[in-house]
Image (cartoon, rainbow, N blue to C red):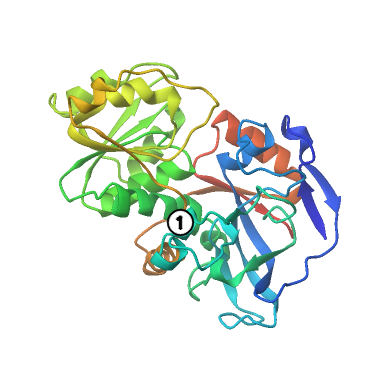
Amino acid sequence: MRAIVIRNTGGPDVLRCEQIPDPTPGPRDVVVKVSRCGVCFHDVVIRNGVMKRGVVLPCIPGHEIAGEVVAVGGDVTLFRQGDRVASTQRYYICGKCKFCRTGREPLCAQMKFLGDVGLFGGYCEFVAISEDNLAVVPDNVPLEHAAIAACTIGTILNAIREVGNVSPGERVLVTGAGGGLGMHSVQLARLAGAEVIALTTSPEKVEQVRAAGADHVVLGTRGEDFSKQVMELTKGEGVDVCIDNVGSQVFQGVRRSMAISGRWVLIGQLTGDFVPFNPAQLFFRSISMLSATSTTREQLKDCLQLLSLGRIKPSISQTLPLVEAPAAHTMVEAGHSLGRILINPAA
């Protein structure tokens, strides 16, 4: 099969299209013919070497996968050939530890992330994934929408519903609002009944972010302290929750934008930079720093149901063939894409 393989870290040019053997299913594996794979910033930091934890090269990047089942292992009971499926961000969990047994499988110590370890990723024609990490796609949901259900939508559902515990009427700040995570953060925060303040550094994305459901859009520049604008919009009170898809680049601005007893949910970190701060700046205002890690299979099922009901509109900017993966990374890294870019291995 054709696959994009990373053998050394570096610029987009290290994404090389190669011919490698087709995967064969283990006893509990499902082989999926990849219809679409989303391009996440996580893929960028794997490729450029910023992300090192858990990475084993060579690897095939990509963890936002949807496609059709073409083969199953002998012990598989949940899926059969011809099923339309979408993946979580993992291809293996143990299924036995305290996290797997309590619906927190992203925390499994033996978890293997799609696209991080070896030749198990979505930038290819076929991929083998353990049946524990897949869900059936409803008939009325296109596979290009299902591909981004787990990471782009599910991580945000986790952040807003489970971790951030957003309540109707609360104020929610979304950073990186024009990106794949950000556009769906705006929609899900609005669906939760929040007043949404969206931060973007791209003037060309302002109207689309507003159309996604933002009550207010703050246009900033990278490195600028935007907290004054946020405090003006909140009459000096600040935001109850921040869904932070950016990380250290907006750290101080977010800190100054938080309300007393605010919940700051960390999701994205775009660089390898560290941030110095005084913990008293948080605990004197009873601000909680939290994090949302990946998506459970049950959350993936919820996201697919939201798509089926039309409650969430997937934000997809364009679809590119496999050989144009370097161009996709260039656009994502520069912040030029509105919503998600998809890879179509069959194109």
21 vs 321, nearest the viewer: 21
**Label 1: how many Cα within 10 Å (few below 14, some 14–19, many 20+):** many
Q: Quadrant of the C terminus?
A: bottom right
Extreme front residue here? 97
Where residue 108 appears, as percent x and y from the top left, is 51, 57
Q: Is residue 187 above or below residue 337?
A: below
From what the image shows, is residue 285 above or below residue 158?
above
Q: Position of residue 285 (x, y in %)?
A: 17, 27
Q: Amino acid at mark 1?
A: Thr
Which of these two is toward me, 14 or 190? Answer: 14
Does dot 1 land on a helix, a strand or a loop?
loop
Q: Which image quadrant is residue 244 in?
A: top left
Q: In screen coordinates, is 75 left or right of 20? A: left
As drawn, 134 above or below 241: below
Which residue lies at the image location 42% right of the left edge and 37% below the top edge? 245
Q: Is residue 59 left or right of residue 99?
A: right
Give the residue displayed 77% in from the left and 45% down from the top.
58
Mark 1, residue position: 295
Residue 301 seen by the camera: no
